[in-house]
Structures are given as structure tokens and as C-alpha cells.
Amino acid sequence: MSSEQTPAVDAPGAASAPGDGPSQDGPSQDSPFRDGRTARDEAPQFVLPLVVRIERAAPPARTDALETAARAVLVVLSDERSLGEGEWARAMRDWQDARIRKVVRRARGAEWRRAEALPGITVTGSAENAAEVRVFPPVPLDGWPKDLARLQVSGTDLDDPEPPAPADPAAPVLWLSPDLDMSAGKAMAQAGHGAQLAWWELSDEERAAWRAAGFPLAVRTAEPGRWAELVASGLPVVRDAGFTEIAPGSCTVVADHPALRRGAAA
């Protein structure tokens, strides 16, 4: 379930608020989401750890885990501890000044209880046997807390017992590529990347409204015939750096937020 990869954004959009992420006025040669080497690679590298709870007897559904991971990223981005002079703000700035990396690990039993004891936020899904994902403030690539470093990044895949319901067209949707076969962990990280891109491109008012609503969103696989249209729509696109599982430059997620559709259509 390793998901330590760096996607690239290849879609224009509104500029971010100062300090909340890179400007998306167009593809930047120094973008944290470009798969080629940039000046950001010279900065100290950090990673955002996410841990999904997967008990042997009752694993969560795949789609619920993906959606919960995406919401977890939004929750930590908007948390007061991540902003201004908050206790996580410096780590969040350092992480966003370099490559934007996320790694998903799995835990069960005592492993999960040890992870819960570390500073972070647990986000719970909405399905039966709801997914639980704990997100932590960014850590150096080589400076993981011991109780997180020992967790596995591979070995467990997740399935949906039944096909997920159609996405609400009035709500944000993170569209996954129908052409790629990604492990649950990689797909969770990619969904988190897509949610982060949408967050960066929203206005302060739009962010506040999304947060107040509890960050509703869906993660769905796009229909093959619609995928090319989504990629070319002007909505934010996640492109993978190819460190794990898939080829460099592969489009993995399109972030389709209602507030961004208007700008993409224009």
C-alpha cells in the first residue's frame, strides 16, 4: 500500500490564499506536483503520514477508505494547529514548500492504539463498518516516529462489497482514472492529493463552506469514455511521478468541485 509519490498538476485555476499552498495560475516550473526535478527537490523533504485501520475480521470498504483519507487531508489542512502560529504550522509550511508527499500505512489492534496515542486527527467514514484514518502532522522523510515507522505499507488490499452508489452531481467528486490499477493505499494517497488541489484552488469563502458542511465528497472511478474529457476540462489533475506502481506522468485523479466547474467551463 505504499503511496510515496509526487503527482503533477497540469490544470490552471485560481490562485491560493497566501501561505496555504502554491499558486495555481498555471503549471509552474517549480510546482510541488511536477514529476520532473525542480528547485523544491533541494528543500528538506517531508511527508504527510496517514494510517488506515484494517482489522483482519472487519476491514473497511475500499471506497469508504478512499473518501475518508481524502477528508482526513482536508481536515488537517484546515485545522487551527496547521495555520498561522499553530503547533503544526511550521511542519505544514515546510511540507508544502517541498514536494507534496503522502504515505499510507496500515495498522490493527495494538498498532492502531499506539498510533492513536500520537498527535494527529482520526477521521471516520460513513459506511457500515466505517473506515478509520488517522492523519499526522508532516514528518521528515527519514524522521518517522517509531510507532509509525514500524507499520506496514503493503500487504492488504481493500474491496467494495457492493458497487458504490452514483456520485451526487452537486457535491465534490474525486474521479479516479479507469485505466490504472492502484492498490488501496496508493489510491488513498492519490485521493488525498486531489482533495488538496481542490482546497488550494478554492476561495476562502468556498473553503469555509466546505469545512462547515463536513467536507462532503465522493471518490469514484470515471467511465472510460468520460475520462479524457475530465482530464482536458481545466479541473485540477493529479499526475503521478512514477515512484511506485504506475508510469511517470500518469493522470490518476481529477478534482471535480462544483465551485471549480464554473472556472473550468470559462
Image (cartoon, rainbow, N blue to C red):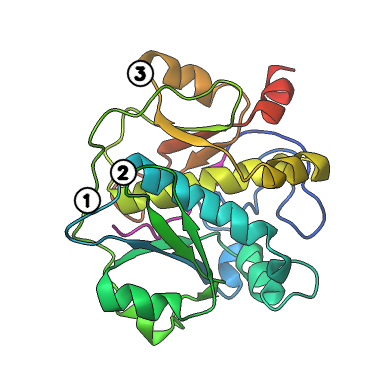
**Mark 2–mark 1 CB contact (< 8 Å):** yes
Q: Name the residue that disc number 3 marks.
A: 224
Q: Is residue 242 visible?
A: no
Give the quadrant of residue 91.
bottom right
Q: How many angstroms separate mark 2 from mark 1 (CA)?
A: 8 Å
The residue at 30%/77% (across/down) is: 111
Q: Which quarter shows the N terminus?
A: bottom left
Q: Which quarter shows the C terminus?
A: top right
Residue 62 marker: 2
Q: Secondary structure at mark 3?
A: helix
Residue 201 painted magenta: no
Label 2 or label 1, whichever comes before in sequence order: 2
Amino acid type indicated by mark 1: Asp
**Which span is picked out in magenta?**
1-9
The residue at 65%/49% (across/down) is: 29
Give the quadrant of residue 195.
top right
Q: How many angstroms separate mark 2 from mark 3 (CA)?
A: 20 Å
Q: Name the residue that disc number 1 marks.
A: 157
In the image, which is nearer the foreground, mark 1 or mark 3? 1
| Mark 3 surroundings within 10 Å by alpha-carbon count, few (fewer than 14), some (14 through 19), many (20 or more) | few
